[in-house]
Amino acid sequence: MTTPQTDDAPRLSVVVPVMNEEGNVGALLSEIVGALRGHAPFEVLFVDDCSTDGTLKALAALKGETPELRVITHDVNCGQSAAIRSGVLKARGPLIVTLDGDGQNNPADIPKLIAHYDRAGRPPNERMVAGQREKRMDNWSKRMASRIGNGVRSGLLKDKTRDTGCGLKLFEREAFLRLPYFDHMHRFLPALMLREGYALSHVDVSHRERQSGASKYTNLQRLWVSLSDLFGVIWLRRRARMPGERREV
Ligand SMILES: Nc1nc2c(ncn2[C@@H]2O[C@H](COP(=O)(O)OP(=O)(O)O)[C@@H](O)[C@H]2O)c(=O)[nH]1
Ligand SMILES: [Mg+2]
């Protein structure tokens, strides 16, 4: 179920997909709150995708002390894209910021994305501000795999984006909910936004080492699904016919 949008809703909903991040959620939540409190009203939705560690327990304990925190759960584990989508469906804010639940994205960059979105002269059809990691804090093999993957994807999709794997993004809730959903779609958001006729822009953001727990992806897994998804997205782009602005006369 989608959460109904109401007049008292905050403008910003921060959505954090998590699976087995018990050692990271507490510090991350306090960093998010520290970066945003005192600016504009916001809520934070952690989406727990059937963690098998103490993530859910840790989140439940944090709820008491953080009124902005909402915790969403799944019945069935279904991946990072599904978790982001669940968070967006449940969000009350018209603006969404996503970031990874392991602390590799820095919440201190969120105000930068919002300020960029709010800049004077933003094109009216710009619906997304995508973070691009300036300096990846991952091991050599992950950086290499990502460089190759990003090169192939941006070459084939021409999606004007150097780094789609960056979890830190800002977008309009309504725009996101118009995009086709599939597992791993979160890696193709720039191409899917462009397909819809929306514009996007980029902001350089920082990146940090994972503090606790382990990565959920291997390079080989990621390469394999990314390749098949890439052909799917090429097909989706080819099959899109967009009417431009829809005007009522
Ligand atoms: N909800 C959900 N989140 C996931 C899943 N796999 C990864 N994540 C989250 O997605 C983010 C990025 O995953 P991570 O393992 O750090 O990827 P890496 O940084 O590319 O190694 C983290 O917040 C993970 O907890 C999943 O299956 N479900
Ligand atoms: Mg990570």
Image: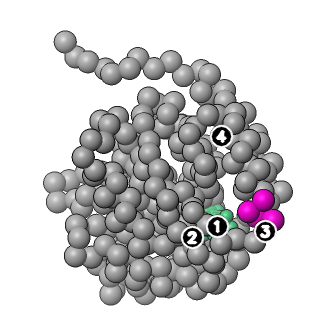
**Mark earlier in primary sequence (3, 2):** 3
- Residue tagged 4: 154
- Separation of disc 4 and disc 1 at Cα? 18 Å
- Indicate left or right for 87 with 24 as reference: left
- Separation of disc 4 and disc 2 at Cα? 21 Å
- Residue tagged 2: 207
Q: Residue at x 37, y 69 (%)?
A: 44
Q: Residue at x 76, y 64 (%)?
A: 142
**Mark earlier in primary sequence (1, 2):** 1
Q: Are marks 3 and 2 in contact (CB under 8 Å)?
A: no
What's the amino acid at mark 1?
Arg
Name the spot of residue 8 as percent of width and height, x first: 17, 60
Name the spot of residue 73 as percent of width and height, x first: 50, 66
Residue bounds of the magenta highlight = 140-144
Element carrying mark 4: helix
Q: Are marks 4 and 2 in contact (CB under 8 Å)?
A: no
**Mark earlier in primary sequence (4, 1):** 1
Q: Alpha-carbon neighbours of circle 4 within 10 Å: few (<14), some, or many (≥20)?
A: some
Q: Are marks 1 and 2 in contact (CB under 8 Å)?
A: yes
Q: Residue at x 57, y 63 (%)?
A: 134
- Residue tagged 3: 140
Q: Alpha-carbon neighbours of circle 1 within 10 Å: few (<14), some, or many (≥20)?
A: some
What's the amino acid at mark 2?
His
Q: Alpha-carbon neighbours of circle 3 within 10 Å: few (<14), some, or many (≥20)?
A: few
What's the amino acid at mark 3?
Trp
- Separation of disc 1 and disc 2 at Cα? 6 Å
